[in-house]
Amino acid sequence: MTLTEKPNIQENLISVLKTVSDPEIPVLSVLDLGVIREAVEKDGIVQIKLTPTYSGCPAMDVIADDLKKAFSEIGKKAEVELILSPAWSTDWISEEGLQKMEEYGIARPLSESHDKDVLLSEKKLVKCPQCGSTNTHLVSQFGSTACKALFKCDECHEPFDYFKCLK
Amino acid sequence: MKNQNLYNYILTIADNSLILAQRLGELCGHGPNLETDIALTNISLDLLGQTRSYYQYAAKIAGENKTEDDIAFLRIEREYKNCLLVEQPNTHFGYTIGRQFLFDVYHLMLMEKLQNSADEILSAIAKKGIKEVSYHKRFSSDWVKRLGDGTEESNAKMQEAIDDLWRFTDELFFMTASEKEMVKEGIGIDVSIFKEKYYEEVSEILKEATLIVPENKYFTKGGKEGVHTEHMGYILADLQYMQRIYPNMTW
């Protein structure tokens, strides 16, 4: 069960994996999100190791089904195994993924120490994805999904989600 | 079953998460405000996710084509091994928060130890769970302080809940025979190690919340050995209804 941090993904499978997105944040592909830890073709079967962002993430079952479907469309059978270790971290979201997330309206995770400052000491560090101001405040530590917290911008007054740092 | 002690041990931990998740799930759409409603159901979802990981592992140990759903839905009351604390009802918001707080402090301490378990799968579940449970604890501690150090009424209600739930805290540190066996094998956690630390931390937060730390030394136990309070049957009726009426149904 020990996998190194860099996922083992076979080159020729990338184009298909890119088409499968996170149902909760559809602009992010499973590769952007870093939840695919291994994808290799063995004896004609694509074997995928998927790790959840949070234990109870309901998107995981959907993602597993979508992966199988995407490969079946190009005539390949895929098997998906859910793995827990090593635990997923927001560090695994690609830079491209972070940019897409921001454009979509979700503030990107801060560093671990800044994340604590924001969630515990209510420091103003999270940048509003609408207007770019950091004059924002925490409304709730739990947002629309387990991985996000709810914020409000005090400049443009828009509410928005902040993707919590997880390490 | 070859590995009965390990199976029992997994359920002792997992059933706490299942029953508490079910209790929190009752509040879906009924939370005192939108943010709290979402927070409580998010916590419920985390716990349910952890439960699934534990049950999938337990099902493998049980063999005979058992599934996680069989374990969740098809046991009788006496076979559930959760502690009495988590099955206590949402009498009012103070109880929901009090129950969560008293459990979260314990749960985080347990996960911190369990991540070093000799069992690779339990260790992985704990490592994943720690990150989630620390959020739960932060949420419930904040609310204990907000209610305790709030108005006269919120203080009285928070105090009432803590006073009432206090008698279930000692059971968290009671160890069944299976747990003791697992401790010997380096898989299980000797929970007595952090009992003192638990009461210290809980007391500190209660004091900060301007609440009185109960001095009651009368404690109740039984849940971990399958002897539950009268609330458990109702929870199971809700939880099991669909599988009992429509066996093997799926969504």
Image (cartoon, coloured by chain):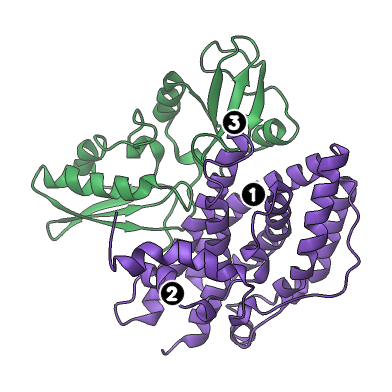
The type of residue carrying mark 1 is His
Residue at the image position 13 percent from the left and 47 percent from the top = A72
> Crowdedness of circle 1 by 10 Å Cα count: few (<14), some, many (20+)?
many
Q: Decide: marks 1, 3 in contact (CB < 8 A)? A: no
Tag 3 residue = A110
Q: Which quarter of the rendering shows the C terminus of chain B? A: bottom left
Of the two numbered discs 1 and 3 in the rendering, the one whose residue sits closer to the viewer: 1
Chain at numbered mark 1: B
Q: Does A129 appear above or below A28?
A: above
Give x and y (percent) for residue B235: 53, 64
Residue at the image position 44 percent from the left and 47 percent from the top = A57
Measure how far apart labels 1 and 2 are at the Cα level.
25 Å
Q: Quadrant of residue B86?
A: bottom right
Total numbered labels placed on residues in the image: 3
Give x and y (percent) for residue A69: 18, 45
Residue A160 seen in render:
yes
Give x and y (percent) for residue A86: 48, 55
Tag 2 residue = B58
Measure how far apart labels 2 and 3 are at the Cα level.
37 Å
Chain in purple on the image: B
Q: Does B240 appear above or below A157?
A: below
Mark 1: which secondary structure?
helix
Residue B118 seen in render:
no
- Closer to the camera, A142 or B243? B243
**Mark 1 and mark 3 on one chain:** no
Tag 1 residue = B136
Horizontally, residue B82 falls left or right of residue B166, namely: left
Q: Quadrant of residue A80?
A: bottom left
Mark 3: which secondary structure?
loop
